[in-house]
Image: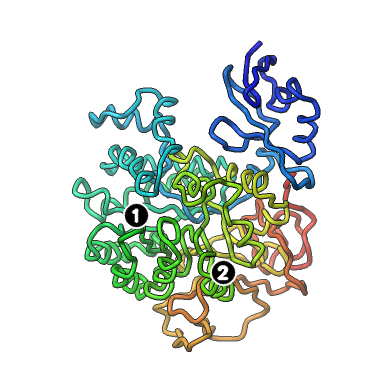
Amino acid sequence: MIRVFVNERPVTVAPGASVRDAVEVLDRELADLVGRGVAYVTDAVGRPVDAGDPVGEGGAIFRVVVSARPGPPRLTKEALRRWPKAELHVHLDGCLRPATMLELARAQGIRLPADTPEGLAQALYVKHAKSLEEYLTKYEITLSVMQTAAALERIAYEFVLDAAADGLRYVEVRYSPLLHRPALTLAQAIEAPLAGIKRGEAETGTKVVLIVCGIRTRAPAESLELARAAAGYRAAGVVAFDLAGAERGFPARDHAAAFAYAAQHGMACTCHAGEGDGPESIHQALHQCGAQRIGHGTRLGEDPSLLEYVIERKIPLEMCLTSNLHTHTVPSLAEHPFKHYLDQGVVVTLNTDGRLVDGISLTDEYFVAQTVLGLTKADLERVVLNACESAFLPSRSRSRSCAPWPCSRCRVSCGIRSRARYDHNSPRRRTARPGRPHQRQWPRPRPHRARFHNGSPGSSGSRSFWASASRCRATVEPSAGGWWAGVWGCSSRSPCSCCSSPSGTGCSRRWATS
């Protein structure tokens, strides 16, 4: 028998018992509320846990929180893990395996704050940070073992494996090559993770691309230097430029030249804003740096006119629930504005930010959104599709390989090979006019195409993504993208590969979500 604590009371259960079993020993009525979705369980630090999970080791602490809103039965973490997902905002230097960190530290003669994987995970887990700036100090520890090309390649490779194990089919992982100098040149710091990603993709089938980050606290000239170096790797898998780091006192507009260079050379642009600083930082990112997506954007609601602008232009937000709690951007998970934004019509996506430092997976974030914020299954499906439609797809030569997304109108994975990224250097580019997006000028008329918007219509950096579906007969756009699981190699003029039905006529195999 093992002893755990539920609502600060000791409870004795058999080894292997579930969290729900422990709650039932304490109070059967409370366990019934958990089963009906009226209450949920958190661990000692306030993270929601699946009531079906085992209690683990003795001494574990659980708290039962009763919600005022009953709802349908919640999806389990295992069901959510099986969902095919996409992630747009995650930092490579926040996702190391603790065991790998220890091996690299020993090989490089670096001292870490703990000498066991479990102890190191606890030391790096951010739970008492008072601000974004304090939160970022944890990254100094992870970066200390990432100063060789071999280490970067291995970490990127293992990142892809871990992402695939969590059900991710597409990931945009970001980091700053500037933070690996002087040990490595910018070229070496870019090529090493690309090599690791390529190995991981070959083993898992998960598509992973890179976003490089300038650093707000560094000289703008360094950001411009990074943009110039990264542009040369656009065809190799570097798809976008970002600006990260402490926000307050370090305005994004100082780095506008780097964003302009990246956009002029065919790279997409995103920018951390609205996390450590107010909505003015979001305004700068959009209107002075040309960002097409916003990293976090948590404080967007403080400016109603800017919120309306973001909704109207369908500018995606890369939101991170647990990370925002750890940086004290929000006082509690229950007070996070994610669901409010979703209900208002903002294109919100769910992301982890840093799996190691935040102690979560993307599955955990979806579970938190469902358990604490009350998102329904349909809401979660919409969030998954938001991430897919907001992705910065690779250059045209690479986007012809199959990606796990369907036609947005019929959810049939037809014609995915024909999806092409808008190319700023294309000779067919048309000059943007105020209030209307750039449009791809195809050389000849094509059949029906479902259009995926990304970025701000009317902004010089906006892009449109197209998926050919030449036999699509759908008349309405569905609320969820449940048809893209497991479909690789389907084209618009051949049967759907998951059920052998003619393309665009409907598919008999549904997305397993329970």
What's the residue type where badge 2 is placed? Answer: Arg
Q: Residue at x 29, y 72 (%)?
A: 257
**Label 2 residue SS:** loop
Q: Does residue 185 lie above or below 151 as drawn?
A: below
Q: Does residue 472 lie above or below 510 as drawn?
A: below
Image location of residue 304, percent across then percent down: 55, 71
What's the residue type where badge 1 is placed? Answer: Gly
Q: Residues within 10 Å of mark 1 (few under 14, many from 20)?
A: some
Residue with the mark numbered 1: 245
Furthest residue toward left: 182
**Label 1 residue SS:** loop
Work out whether residue 268 can be spotted. Answer: no
Residue with the mark numbered 2: 419
In the image shown, does 400 or 69 lie closer to the viewer?
69
Q: Quadrant of residue 46?
A: top right
**Quarter occupied by the C terminus:** top right
Image location of residue 172, percent across then percent down: 47, 55
Q: Residue at x 43, y 69 (%)?
A: 291
